[in-house]
Image (cartoon, rainbow, N blue to C red):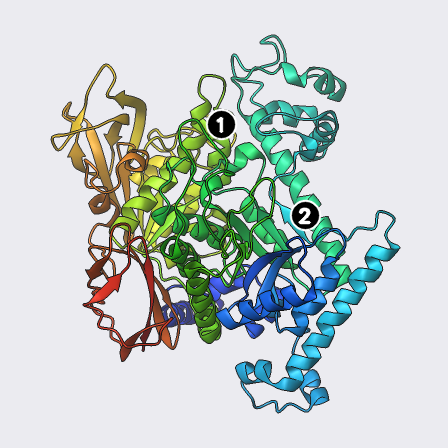
Amino acid sequence: MKPSNCLLTILLIFSIFIQVYAQSDPYLHQRYDALHDSPMQQKFRKLAPMPAGVVYVQQPNEGEKEMRAHFRNMKKLGFNALKQIMPLPNWTIEQISLIALEEGIMPWWYGEGGYEEITPALLEQLGIAKTLSMSEILEHPKMINYQKEVAKKRIQNIEKYIQDSPDKKFMRVTSVAYDPEIGGRGVELSTKGEALFLEWLKKRYQTVENLNQAWNQYHAGLFLNEQRVFSDWEDVTKNWRNITGREYNHVKDIYRFKVEHNLGRIRESAAQFNRFDANAPYRGGGELAVFHPFAWYGVDMEGIADVLTQYGSFYPSMHFSWHYNLVKGEITKSLYQQASLMNDFNKGGWTGGWESTGGPMQMDGEKNPGHNNSYYVGPGELMQLYLSQLAAGFKGFGIWCWNARSAGKEGGEYSLLDRNGQLTDRAVAIGQLGKAMQKYRFELWKAHKEPLVGILYDWENEATWGAMSISGRDDFRFQPVKARIGISNVLMANNVPFEYLTPNDLSKGLAGRYKVLYLPAMITVRKELLPLLKKYVQDGGRLVIDLPSGWYDENTVNLPTGKGSDFEQLFGATIDDFQFSGTNRQLTIAGKDVLGFTMNSTATAARVVEKYDNGKPAVLEHSLGKGKAILLGFQASLNAFENAEKPSLPILQYALGAYSSPYSCSNALVYRLAAPEADHYFLLNEATAKTVALDFKNLKYKRVTDAITGETVDSNQLKIATKGGRWLRAEK
């Protein structure tokens, strides 16, 4: 056989293999699981930990007797871990940890995730049959007792570390996303931060000429004092702050520097803890809501998830009164979006709700003049919170708190018990959820989303909006957040399964997981993304981009969008100018008023689907290979932030084309996780109590049960409480 024929045969065989593989794994679940794979994550998947944790706040005059009563109540209700312990001055965390352990409550947020790895050698040592399932092994008395001893030894080691430590404190076992050590939000740098930033610049750019190029110093009106470029590093040190605010990429570099510094801090802290105890997970992510502009804060959540791959678990903080200012207190949709974005940053890794609210809150949230952050929090609202987390892919929760602080700030708030220390209906409801999580833990650890739509999140895009957020335009930093919320709300209102993804996910081969890929308000489109997006379309994907997208590249240089550009080759059209409708000129599309960004565009190969009333192309569709690229000439996702239920233009039709959701429910939000044994559906009600019908369309099941109560249900007659939710298990 000739070499060329041999190569052709190999390529043909490989192509057939890929096709067969894609047919057996159409959502690329195996590739998804591999994205944050490590020995630590493999251990988690094997153990399938599902902590149902709470924070215990020791009350004045509470001693061992009272503590044991609390821990027994927790276990009886369905809680199995302590997310945190807050002792009185005459007690230690370690003393209380031992009492909790004796009562069958793991004294750490990670529950069984901190077990010593269960190996064949350990089973042989304990005399446990290797033929038992992991569920049976974990319930075996010998394994329970052994792992308790592992936990006791950990407590003893912590006590010794504290005793030997000069400051009598334990090391950090968790990290927050944002640390002001090197400067505050935005471009603010401390004295230490500025010195480190200048060193970072030297390492990043090597030469001053490279810096001049990166900071657009050869573009008119942007160079130093509008007189000259930088001459040497001493010049940079003395004069870099004199760069005009009109130059955006040096601002993005401040964000990039803060990100790298913070990631280094987290990596060092996680590695230190891992050296202390290789079995115990470290957690990071923390107190920064997903409705804040990450880049402007100097935070990269995906980067944090990447660091934690080797060390533990990723998490957000989820409190009604701290995180939902931007959405004016709407929580039902927002809860899932927040959990889903964090889970999707950590595809294949362990993500959980390790800091989430447990009760009413009125006095101690983050107050903004435009929104009073006081909330009613009953069992319905909490069920929506924790069902949203499960539906997003979280594996466990940690509730702040079991019993409230007894004085001062947050006194009497946030807790599962009432202010008098009595059990509440919300404690009972979430405890029952905890039991169901344990029952289906192995099934949930095998479950995946099966998204129809992927919504692209790019840190570079968010950073550009942040850099543009100068005085008088402070709201610019929130535009990509609003756009993400807007398109998400449209999909959720129509029960369309979606997932967030990043450019890293695309580069690692996950594009084929999504029939539709949506790019909302991508004012920066990285040049390196365009070939990936083109291949996605050629392979059969449906790419949709709205305005204002394609304005800049990653360095805030105007992106080429004219004839012959990569952009034009992808969309079959040029963007000649960005325009605006609703101020001095009101444009319409299909008779509907358009508000916000529009464009002057020329169709080169694309089909004009809709025109503005001025006759210019407004919606274009380009057939390329097996797929299509759609250019929406209006700010669809940004406008949907204000009105997702009934948008003036048919965003969903433009986005999905002929695609539709595999299930529907006209009067409730529905999310689905698919597992080999069963599919899990989570239904949330945004209004008063109602009965709804869930249509599975072409999906067939043996029976459908309520995952919490175990009762068989009729999917056409599903009762959902006011502002409540239900979890259904559809057996295959």
Which of the marked residues, 2 or 1, is nearer the chain's N terminus? 2
**Looking at the picture, how far across and down is residue 35, in whole percent?**
53, 59
Instruction: From the top left corner, tell me how far across and down residue 691 is, in percent.
Output: 20, 61
149 left or right, relative to 528: right
Q: Residue furthest top?
A: 227
Residue 309, image x and y in percent?
A: 61, 58
**Is residue 523 among the parts visible in the rendering?**
no
Query: Which percent across, then down, holds residue 551?
Result: 40, 28
Inter-mark Cα distance, 2 to 1: 29 Å
Does the image show residue 51? yes
Query: Looking at the image, which residue is at 46% across and 69% down?
Result: 437
User: Does residue 76 sit above or below 519 in this rendering?
Assistant: below
Q: Secondary structure at mark 1?
A: loop
Tell which of 393 and 51 is nearer to you.
51
Disc 1 residue crowd, few under 14, some 14–19, many 20+, Cα 10 Å? many
Q: Is residue 295 above or below residue 692?
A: above
The residue at the point 70 percent across, 19 percent down is 236
- Please tell me the numbered disc located at residue 416: none
Give, as a three-letter code, the residue at label 1.
Answer: Thr
Q: Which residue is mark 1?
A: 556
Q: Which residue is mark 2?
A: 266
**What is the crowding at mark 2: few (fewer than 14 residues within 10 Å), some, or many (at least 20)?**
many
Q: Residue furthest left?
A: 591
User: For the residue marked with disc 2, what is the amino acid?
Assistant: Ile
- Closer to viewer: mark 2 or mark 1: 2
Seen in the image, is 164 located left or right of residue 652? right
* Residue nearest the viewer, comparing 411 with 464: 411
**Residue at disc 2, secondary structure:** helix
